[in-house]
Amino acid sequence: MNRAIWAIAAPSMLTNVATALFGLADMWVIGRLGEAAAQGAVEVGAKLLMTLLIVFNFLRSGTTALTAQAAGRGDDHAQAAALTRSLAAALLIGALILILRPLVLRFGLQMLGATADVADLARTYVNVRYLGGVAWLVNAVVVGWLIGRRRVRAVLAVEVGANLFHIALDVTLVLGFHLGVAGVAAATLSSETAKLVALLAITLREAPARRALALARERSTWRAGELSALFSLNRDLFARTLLLMSATVLVTRAGAQQGPVILATNAILFQLFMLATLILDGFESSAQVLCGEALGARDRARFTALVRTILGWAGGLAALIALVYALAGPRLAASFSTDPAVVASTGVYAAWAIALPLCGVASFVFDGVYIGASWTRAMLIGMAAALAVFVALLEATRPLGDHGLWLAFSVFFLARAAGQALMLPGLVRRSFAPA
């Protein structure tokens, strides 16, 4: 069991670290300019697009869950059909996003509280990168499908290559050609497109994937019953992710209201948090795949053992990350800017980068368990309750300034984990009850 967990978790961690390099490279390169407004603009522009796109991350999670469950049953046809339906959904959503572009630009920056120079530079960033949204959506489906088939190493290879390409473009366009914020956006757009081409090439080598195009022409693929499973799963995941992104938007907005220095500080701390999150999410991937397979095989004993074991490994790694951040976090955070005010500010708030991985780790693992088992309605309920706690704390801790903001965000993750832990026993009993 431990080997099975790490066979998925380790490549997923490396893949996710490579993904984190997108944001970290952008923040580091733009920080060489020594302009808080430019650094804040990249944070606002990236957060706007992340808010727009991450709510559709159910395309990845849902595809992983359905593919893993089909794999647990040994059903190649269902795996191919899952890819077909998810790709169709991604393309439809991509078309809608392109149509809504003027509204996204107009209201998105207002929502995030961007003003003056930050808003103008953020608009430049979004205008350049916006077309990459369709590639991001299709990438989410293909990555989810490959992970569901345990092809995590192939995903890792593509992610590492795309990120090396991205970093090279970042340095060339921003520091070499002095394109500033527009250069950061162009580097991201180019690397997302290159990643899509590579992922599709790998996917088409899988036997079920080669059947996916033919299934698109079969009426049975689009039967109401078949689509219902996809849409009910994705509907709950969409709403849950929307609530999660609402929390991150509130964090960004609260930082923007405190001025460009705090906004840039929070952007750096959030990138360190995302790095820790993406490492720990390797265990979420293990939980999605292995718990999905165990449910598909109706093996309750293996399911419960997987939950306990994955939580143990993830907790240990979270403690190690917190230790690394305690030793090197302040210096690492300060390295992301040459603005003296931002550097000083990161030192004041760097302790929250240590606390957040410990607060969030259990909720990350439970997310994987719930998605793999298709318990998305319960997951949504837990997220809604945790968000209500976060909003209440955000107001209550306002006098504490930025410390209050990060305290509320930390409790948000603890509340999520507590709700998921309370619901877990009943969900297990119902899902594994005799038919």
Image: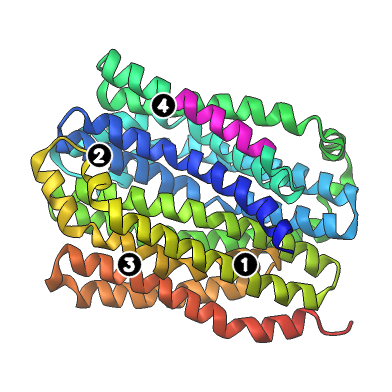
Majority secondary structure of magenta residues: helix
Q: Residue at x 63, y 54 (%)?
A: 61
Residue at numbered disc 2: 336
Q: Which amino acid type is shown beneath numbered disc 2?
A: Phe
The residue singled out by tag 1 in the image is: 310
Q: Distance between the residues labelled 4 and 3?
A: 30 Å
Q: Label 3 sits on what residue type?
A: Phe
**Is mark 2 in CB contact (under 8 Å) with mark 3?**
no
**Residue 269 on image: x %, y %:** 28, 52
> Is 49 covered by the magenta stretch?
no
Residue 163 within the magenta-colored segment of the rendering: yes
Numbered circle sitting on residue 409 = 3
Q: Contact (CB < 8 A) between labels 4 and 1?
A: no
Residue pointed to by mark 4: 167
In the displayed structure, 112 sits above or below 287; it is: above
Q: Give the range drawn in magenta.
A: 154-166
Q: What element carries label 4?
A: helix
Q: Which type of secondary structure does the marked residue at label 3 adopt?
A: helix
Image depth: mark 2 or mark 3 in front: 2
Judge whether 109 appears above or below 325 on screen.
above
Residue 399 tag number: none
